[in-house]
Amino acid sequence: MFYFLHRMSTCTYWLAGEPTEPEPWVIDLNRDLTTHEDELSRYLAVPKLNYVFGGLATIMTTTMRHGLTRLVDKRINKNGVMQLNRNCFALQQNLTSIAVTGGAAAAGAVASAALAAVASNSGSLSSADRLFDHARQYFELLNYTEEDLKQFIDEQTEAAASPSAAGGSGGAGNSRAPLFTKDEYNALRDIKTPAKMVRAGGSGKPSDSKSGK
Protein backbone atom coordinates (compact mmCIF):
# COMPACT_ATOMS: atom_id res chain seq x y z
CA MET A 1 0.00 0.00 0.00
CA PHE A 2 2.82 2.42 0.83
CA TYR A 3 4.21 1.84 -2.66
CA PHE A 4 1.08 3.42 -4.14
CA LEU A 5 0.76 6.18 -1.54
CA HIS A 6 4.36 7.27 -1.98
CA ARG A 7 3.77 7.78 -5.71
CA MET A 8 1.95 10.95 -4.68
CA SER A 9 5.35 12.63 -4.14
CA THR A 10 6.13 12.61 -7.87
CA CYS A 11 2.74 13.95 -8.96
CA THR A 12 2.05 17.51 -10.08
CA TYR A 13 -0.82 19.40 -8.48
CA TRP A 14 -0.59 22.60 -10.46
CA LEU A 15 -3.29 21.63 -12.96
CA ALA A 16 -4.73 23.54 -15.90
CA GLY A 17 -8.19 21.97 -15.70
CA GLU A 18 -10.55 20.59 -13.10
CA PRO A 19 -9.91 16.88 -12.42
CA THR A 20 -12.68 14.44 -13.27
CA GLU A 21 -11.08 11.23 -11.99
CA PRO A 22 -8.81 10.15 -9.15
CA GLU A 23 -5.15 9.80 -10.01
CA PRO A 24 -3.80 6.54 -11.50
CA TRP A 25 -2.02 5.59 -8.26
CA VAL A 26 -5.34 5.85 -6.40
CA ILE A 27 -7.07 3.64 -8.96
CA ASP A 28 -4.22 1.12 -8.73
CA LEU A 29 -4.35 1.13 -4.92
CA ASN A 30 -8.12 0.61 -4.87
CA ARG A 31 -7.81 -2.24 -7.34
CA ASP A 32 -5.07 -3.83 -5.22
CA LEU A 33 -7.14 -3.56 -2.02
CA THR A 34 -10.20 -5.03 -3.72
CA THR A 35 -8.14 -7.95 -5.01
CA HIS A 36 -6.78 -8.67 -1.54
CA GLU A 37 -10.27 -8.40 -0.06
CA ASP A 38 -11.57 -10.94 -2.58
CA GLU A 39 -8.78 -13.36 -1.70
CA LEU A 40 -9.02 -12.95 2.08
CA SER A 41 -12.81 -13.27 2.09
CA ARG A 42 -12.37 -16.95 1.17
CA TYR A 43 -10.62 -17.67 4.45
CA LEU A 44 -11.70 -15.01 6.95
CA ALA A 45 -15.09 -14.37 8.51
CA VAL A 46 -16.59 -10.90 8.18
CA PRO A 47 -15.51 -9.57 11.60
CA LYS A 48 -11.89 -10.64 11.06
CA LEU A 49 -11.88 -9.29 7.52
CA ASN A 50 -13.22 -5.97 8.74
CA TYR A 51 -10.51 -5.95 11.41
CA VAL A 52 -7.79 -6.41 8.78
CA PHE A 53 -8.97 -3.41 6.78
CA GLY A 54 -10.15 -1.36 9.75
CA GLY A 55 -6.96 0.66 10.24
CA LEU A 56 -6.29 1.50 6.61
CA ALA A 57 -8.15 4.83 6.71
CA THR A 58 -5.76 6.11 9.38
CA ILE A 59 -2.70 5.01 7.40
CA MET A 60 -4.01 6.45 4.14
CA THR A 61 -5.06 9.87 5.43
CA THR A 62 -1.95 10.34 7.58
CA THR A 63 0.37 9.36 4.72
CA MET A 64 -1.42 11.66 2.29
CA ARG A 65 -1.22 14.64 4.65
CA HIS A 66 2.46 14.00 5.27
CA GLY A 67 2.87 13.57 1.52
CA LEU A 68 2.93 17.34 1.06
CA THR A 69 6.40 17.44 2.64
CA ARG A 70 7.70 14.96 0.07
CA LEU A 71 6.32 16.61 -3.07
CA VAL A 72 8.98 17.19 -5.70
CA ASP A 73 6.90 19.98 -7.25
CA LYS A 74 5.85 22.08 -4.28
CA ARG A 75 3.15 24.02 -6.14
CA ILE A 76 -0.55 23.39 -5.78
CA ASN A 77 -3.39 25.41 -7.30
CA LYS A 78 -7.14 25.19 -6.73
CA ASN A 79 -7.51 22.39 -9.28
CA GLY A 80 -4.73 20.52 -7.51
CA VAL A 81 -6.62 20.78 -4.23
CA MET A 82 -9.68 19.42 -6.01
CA GLN A 83 -7.54 16.51 -7.24
CA LEU A 84 -6.33 15.72 -3.72
CA ASN A 85 -9.90 15.79 -2.43
CA ARG A 86 -11.09 13.58 -5.28
CA ASN A 87 -8.35 11.11 -4.38
CA CYS A 88 -9.59 11.10 -0.78
CA PHE A 89 -13.17 10.49 -1.86
CA ALA A 90 -12.21 7.58 -4.14
CA LEU A 91 -10.19 5.89 -1.38
CA GLN A 92 -12.96 6.48 1.17
CA GLN A 93 -15.62 5.09 -1.16
CA ASN A 94 -13.58 1.95 -1.82
CA LEU A 95 -12.87 1.31 1.86
CA THR A 96 -16.55 1.79 2.68
CA SER A 97 -17.44 -0.74 0.00
CA ILE A 98 -14.96 -3.24 1.44
CA ALA A 99 -16.26 -2.70 4.99
CA VAL A 100 -19.88 -3.23 3.96
CA THR A 101 -19.49 -6.08 1.48
CA GLY A 102 -16.32 -7.74 2.73
CA GLY A 103 -16.58 -11.43 3.47
CA ALA A 104 -19.87 -12.00 1.68
CA ALA A 105 -18.55 -15.09 -0.07
CA ALA A 106 -17.23 -16.54 3.17
CA ALA A 107 -20.39 -15.78 5.11
CA GLY A 108 -22.43 -18.32 3.15
CA ALA A 109 -25.97 -18.85 4.41
CA VAL A 110 -25.63 -16.19 7.12
CA ALA A 111 -24.35 -13.51 4.77
CA SER A 112 -27.33 -11.22 5.22
CA ALA A 113 -27.09 -11.19 9.00
CA ALA A 114 -23.33 -10.74 8.94
CA LEU A 115 -23.46 -7.86 6.50
CA ALA A 116 -26.16 -6.21 8.56
CA ALA A 117 -23.93 -6.44 11.62
CA VAL A 118 -21.05 -4.83 9.74
CA ALA A 119 -23.26 -2.08 8.37
CA SER A 120 -24.58 -1.35 11.85
CA ASN A 121 -21.03 -0.88 13.14
CA SER A 122 -21.40 2.88 12.77
CA GLY A 123 -18.44 3.56 15.03
CA SER A 124 -15.99 1.97 12.61
CA LEU A 125 -17.49 3.46 9.48
CA SER A 126 -18.00 6.95 10.92
CA SER A 127 -14.41 6.88 12.19
CA ALA A 128 -13.14 6.35 8.63
CA ASP A 129 -15.45 9.09 7.36
CA ARG A 130 -14.11 11.50 9.97
CA LEU A 131 -10.53 10.68 9.02
CA PHE A 132 -11.10 11.42 5.35
CA ASP A 133 -13.06 14.58 6.20
CA HIS A 134 -10.10 15.60 8.33
CA ALA A 135 -7.73 15.07 5.40
CA ARG A 136 -9.96 17.09 3.05
CA GLN A 137 -10.11 19.90 5.61
CA TYR A 138 -6.32 19.92 5.66
CA PHE A 139 -6.02 20.12 1.88
CA GLU A 140 -8.61 22.91 1.73
CA LEU A 141 -6.24 25.05 3.81
CA LEU A 142 -4.07 25.23 0.69
CA ASN A 143 -6.65 27.65 -0.74
CA TYR A 144 -6.10 30.09 2.15
CA THR A 145 -4.07 33.26 1.77
CA GLU A 146 -0.93 33.47 3.87
CA GLU A 147 -2.66 35.80 6.33
CA ASP A 148 -5.75 33.60 6.62
CA LEU A 149 -3.61 30.51 7.11
CA LYS A 150 -1.59 32.23 9.83
CA GLN A 151 -4.77 33.31 11.59
CA PHE A 152 -6.20 29.78 11.39
CA ILE A 153 -3.01 28.24 12.79
CA ASP A 154 -2.85 30.82 15.60
CA GLU A 155 -6.47 30.17 16.55
CA GLN A 156 -6.02 26.40 16.53
CA THR A 157 -2.80 26.63 18.53
CA GLU A 158 -4.46 28.87 21.12
CA ALA A 159 -7.50 26.59 21.35
CA ALA A 160 -5.30 23.53 21.82
CA ALA A 161 -3.36 25.22 24.60
CA SER A 162 -6.39 26.57 26.48
CA PRO A 163 -8.18 24.48 29.14
CA SER A 164 -11.55 23.21 27.96
CA ALA A 165 -14.74 24.52 29.50
CA ALA A 166 -15.28 21.10 31.01
CA GLY A 167 -12.33 21.70 33.31
CA GLY A 168 -14.04 24.56 35.06
CA SER A 169 -12.42 27.63 36.53
CA GLY A 170 -11.18 25.79 39.59
CA GLY A 171 -9.67 22.79 37.83
CA ALA A 172 -6.77 22.18 35.55
CA GLY A 173 -9.07 21.31 32.65
CA ASN A 174 -8.14 19.42 29.51
CA SER A 175 -6.42 20.87 26.46
CA ARG A 176 -8.00 20.07 23.13
CA ALA A 177 -5.91 17.94 20.81
CA PRO A 178 -4.33 20.00 17.99
CA LEU A 179 -6.24 19.77 14.73
CA PHE A 180 -2.99 19.21 12.81
CA THR A 181 0.65 18.81 13.79
CA LYS A 182 3.31 21.51 13.65
CA ASP A 183 5.03 19.72 10.77
CA GLU A 184 1.77 19.58 8.84
CA TYR A 185 1.23 23.32 9.31
CA ASN A 186 4.82 23.97 8.19
CA ALA A 187 4.19 21.88 5.08
CA LEU A 188 1.22 24.09 4.21
CA ARG A 189 3.40 27.18 4.54
CA ASP A 190 6.06 25.72 2.24
CA ILE A 191 3.66 24.98 -0.62
CA LYS A 192 3.37 27.69 -3.28
CA THR A 193 -0.26 28.47 -4.10
CA PRO A 194 -2.03 31.13 -6.21
CA ALA A 195 -3.54 32.71 -3.10
CA LYS A 196 -0.10 33.28 -1.59
CA MET A 197 1.43 34.49 -4.87
CA VAL A 198 -1.31 37.03 -5.62
CA ARG A 199 -1.13 38.41 -2.09
CA ALA A 200 2.62 38.77 -2.45
CA GLY A 201 2.16 40.86 -5.59
CA GLY A 202 2.63 38.14 -8.19
CA SER A 203 0.28 36.96 -10.92
CA GLY A 204 -0.60 33.68 -9.24
CA LYS A 205 1.14 31.81 -12.06
CA PRO A 206 4.71 30.56 -11.64
CA SER A 207 7.00 31.40 -14.52
CA ASP A 208 7.55 27.71 -15.27
CA SER A 209 3.92 26.72 -14.72
CA LYS A 210 2.88 23.62 -16.65
CA SER A 211 -0.08 23.98 -18.93
CA GLY A 212 -1.25 20.41 -18.40
CA LYS A 213 -1.00 17.63 -15.87
Image (cartoon, rainbow, N blue to C red):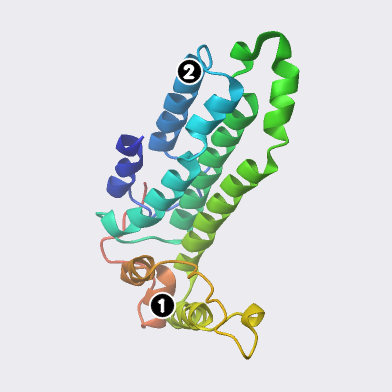
76, above or below 171, in the image: above
- In this view, the residue farthest toward the bottom is 169
Label 1 – label 2 distance at C-alpha:
51 Å
Residue lying at 46% horizontally and 51% vertically, measured from the top left: 84
Please tell me whether mark 1 sits on a helix, a strand or a loop: helix
84, above or below 98, in the image: below
Residue lying at 47% horizontally and 15% vertically, measured from the top left: 39
Residue 130 in the image: state x and y as whole percent: 59, 53
In depth, the one of 101 and 175 nearer the eye is 175
Task: Name which residue type carries label 2.
Answer: Leu
- In this view, the residue farthest toward the top is 109
The quadrant of the rendering that contains the N terminus is top left
In depth, the one of 165 and 183 nearer the eye is 165
N-terminal-most mark, 1 or 2: 2
Q: Is residue 205 left or right of residue 169?
A: left
Residue lying at 61% horizontally and 12% vertically, measured from the top left: 105
Task: Name which residue type carries label 1.
Answer: Val
Residue topped by disc 1: 198
Residue lying at 45% horizontally and 66% vertically, measured from the top left: 180
97, above or below 66, in the image: above
Residue 201 in the image: state x and y as whole percent: 36, 83
Query: Quick check: marks 1 and 2 in contact, CB under 8 Å?
Result: no
Residue 208 in the image: state x and y as whole percent: 26, 61
In depth, the one of 185 and 119 nearer the eye is 119
- Mark number for residue 40? 2
In depth, the one of 146 and 67 nearer the eye is 67
Please tell me whether mark 2 sits on a helix, a strand or a loop: helix
- Mark number for residue 146? none
Residue 21 in the image: state x and y as whole percent: 51, 39
